[in-house]
Image (spheres, helix red, strand yellow):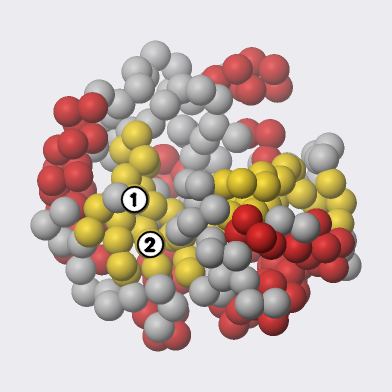
Amino acid sequence: MKARIHSLESFGTVDGPGIRFVTFMQGCPLRCRYCHNPDTWDVKASCQYEMTPEELFAETIRYRSFIVSGGVTVTGGEPLMQASFVREYFRLCTEAGLHTALDTSGILCTQDALSVLEYTSLVLLDIKTINPELHPQLTGSRGENPLRFLNELERRGIPTWIRHVIVPGWTDSEADLNALGRHIANYRVVEKVELLPYHTMGIFKYKEMGIPYPLEGVEPLAKKVLQRAREILGQYKEVL
């Protein structure tokens, strides 16, 4: 069993607690308007690595002395497109005493995808928007599965951080931010919320790939708007 891997990061500090070995998987079913990694969409596209779980684990363990107080994170793309691989890799890491974090949109809520949770210490759940009418416009997909995925995390008692990108004119509505806050306030497993400001650093990839950038002309998020979002969500959960 080999997976297609877009890239590896040996000393990640923004994808879970502590210093982490981060694996970026190839493939994603979503087409988020603000995506800054369109080169990860196609699971069959050229990638840096094709590895078995054992090979990835062998590479990971080389950095054990650095990540022992942090752990490993698998992100994407959408890592659950290659769920069987992630499950086996997480099993090896768990048996070696490493903390495992899964960064997912929750858009794949199949039995295969959920099986990864057996060896998952923490889930970084990317909720694109709580607004069911906006979700298809923003991502190209309906928004029920991420919420079903969150319900499953609650049922299993898996610690969860919510990730939410604040995009000007799209996800900065105070009404939607309050609705998100009220929703996640009901979940004991949700420990905190990480708010990510929209940026335009990935635009060059669209140009290189010859595809139009969906949010052309939208400026990076203003600091005052991000601060207001922090204030709103902070009424319901701890905000990073």
The percent coordinates of residue 158 (x first, y second) are 44, 78
Give me the residue at 13% from left, 46% from top: 231
Residue in the foreground of this view, choosing between 34 and 5: 5
Q: Residues within 10 Å of mark 2 (few under 14, many from 20)?
A: many
Label 1, on which residue? 194
Q: Residues within 10 Å of mark 1 (few under 14, many from 20)?
A: some
The percent coordinates of residue 229 (x first, y second) are 19, 42
Residue in the foreground of this view, choosing between 66 and 209: 66
Label 1 element class: strand
Give me the residue at 34% from left, 50% from top: 194
Give me the residue at 30% from left, 50% from top: 240
The percent coordinates of residue 109 (x first, y second) are 54, 70
Residue in the foreground of this view, choosing between 115 and 69: 69
Label 2, on which residue? 161
The residue type indicated by label 2 comes to: Trp
Give me the residue at 27% from left, 77% from top: 188
